Image (cartoon, rainbow, N blue to C red):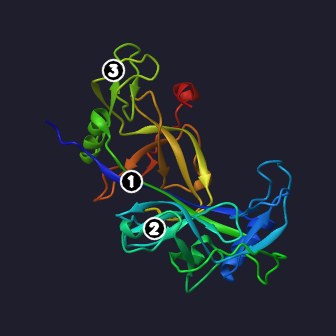
């Protein structure tokens, strides 16, 4: 049985969000150990606050300060915290109705174990030592002996040096198994060969192979070696340096292109090197450049051959 390939993959990017006046006041307030809600037209206090009334869709700006203590309305125990979660020891996810609020705030509760948890228990905020204007300024909730207090006070929402934007890192960790067709493709790359698979019906060669023809819908099993040279069908000039990737040493601008390898009916993508970025063009003939440790071409460079005629690759654009 052939080796089953798999690899951990991470998709990650920072998402920057601009805050409106209500969310700005809420997050800036957390930095100042102040929890703000917003009062709706029917007198309900929403925490966390929103900018529009969920019942009437009217814009709401009537900010109020609520208490730092509250009541657990429901909970779920997390015995195995994951990377990036608020606490690294087992904790409870909780919905807490803060004193003076009519809705519940989702956060975590630091408790010894699930036997110490119950709906209706009283809790208080444990503030983070260093606060920046984020929901993590509430480090967690902790059990507290206190009586509910419904008193709320109006608040202008005005603070010095208000938080106006937040950056949220979006991240997806998963394990990828390529399957039969792509495993053959990856194993061939280890030998500095590029293989595709031919459709038994339309006879097109797909690189990388997909295991089935996307046009005819039939399985593909016949392997076909293509390249190594190919033709640039189209390209883009990259002017922004990528972050959190293995290509941090690539200086901008550089060119990323779709390349139709000789014998293939599908263009793959690769970086173009060995030529000034403003001299890359459609029809340019290129060949792969390998590094000693890579399992795929590091980039493609010009072969020195005459450019390919447009009619030879126009179907692959």
Q: Say which quadrant the N terminus sits in.
A: top left
Q: 44 left or right of 234? A: right
Residue in view at x 41 percent, y 29 percent = 264
Task: Report x, y in % for residue 95.
Answer: 56, 62
Task: Report x, y in % for residue 82.
Answer: 39, 64
62 w.r.t. 231: above or below: below
Q: What is the secondary structure assignment of the residue under circle 1? A: strand
Closest to the observer, 255 or 154: 154
Q: Is residue 215 visible?
A: yes
Within the image, what quadrant is residue 282 found in?
Answer: top right
**Mark number, residue 247:** none
Closest to the observer, 188 or 289: 188
Residue in view at x 38 percent, y 53 percent = 9
181 w.r.t. 46: above or below: above
Residue in view at x 48 percent, y 37 percent = 231
Q: Of callouts 3 and 2, which one flags the residue occurring earlier in the amino acid sequence? A: 2
Residue bearing the label numbered 3: 219
Within the image, what quadrant is residue 154 found in?
Answer: bottom right
Labels 1, 3: front one: 1
Q: Of callouts 1 and 3, which one flags the residue occurring earlier in the amino acid sequence? A: 1
**Mark number, residue 84:** 2
Closest to the observer, 76 or 18: 76
Q: Circle 1: is it few (<14), some (14-19), or many (20+) Cα within 10 Å?
A: few
Task: Report x, y in % for residue 5.
Answer: 25, 45
Residue bearing the label numbered 1: 9
Q: What is the secondary structure assignment of the residue under circle 3? A: loop
Q: Is residue 194 visible?
A: no
Q: 88 left or right of 103? A: left
145 w.r.t. 201: above or below: below
How far is the residue under mark 1 from the one under mark 3? Answer: 27 Å
How far is the residue under mark 2 from the one under mark 1? Answer: 17 Å
Q: Of callouts 2 and 1, which one flags the residue occurring earlier in the amino acid sequence? A: 1
């Amino acid at each position: 049985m052939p080796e089953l390939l798999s690899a951990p993959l991470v998709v990650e990017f920072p998402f920057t969000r601009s805050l409106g006046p209500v969310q700005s006041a809420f997050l800036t307030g957390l930095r100042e150990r102040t929890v703000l809600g917003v009062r709706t037209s029917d007198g309900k206090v929403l925490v966390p606050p929103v900018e529009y009334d969920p019942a009437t869709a009217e814009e709401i700006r009537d900010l109020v300060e609520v208490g730092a203590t509250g009541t657990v309305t429901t909970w779920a125990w997390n015995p195995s915290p994951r990377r990036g979660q608020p606490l690294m020891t087992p904790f409870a996810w909780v919905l807490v109705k803060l004193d003076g609020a009519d809705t519940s705030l989702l956060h975590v509760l630091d408790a010894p174990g699930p036997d110490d948890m119950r709906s209706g228990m009283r809790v208080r905020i444990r503030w983070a030592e260093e606060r920046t204007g984020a929901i993590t300024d509430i480090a967690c909730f902790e059990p507290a002996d206190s009586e509910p207090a419904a008193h709320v006070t109006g608040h202008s929402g005005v603070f010095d040096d208000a938080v106006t934007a937040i950056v949220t890192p979006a991240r997806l960790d998963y394990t990828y198994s390529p399957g039969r067709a792509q495993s053959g493709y990856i194993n061939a790359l280890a030998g500095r060969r590029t293989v595709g698979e031919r459709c038994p019906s339309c006879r097109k060669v797909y690189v990388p192979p997909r295991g089935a023809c996307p046009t005819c819908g039939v399985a593909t099993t016949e392997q076909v070696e293509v390249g190594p040279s190919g033709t640039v069908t189209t390209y883009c000039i990259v002017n922004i340096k990528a972050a959190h990737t293995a290509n941090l040493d690539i200086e901008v601008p550089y060119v990323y292109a779709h390349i139709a390898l000789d014998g293939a009916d599908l263009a793959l993508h690769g970086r173009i090197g060995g030529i000034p970025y403003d001299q890359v063009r459609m029809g340019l003939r290129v060949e792969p450049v390998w590094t000693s440790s890579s399992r795929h071409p590091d980039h493609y460079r010009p072969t020195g051959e005459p450019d390919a005629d447009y009619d030879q690759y126009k179907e692959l654009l």
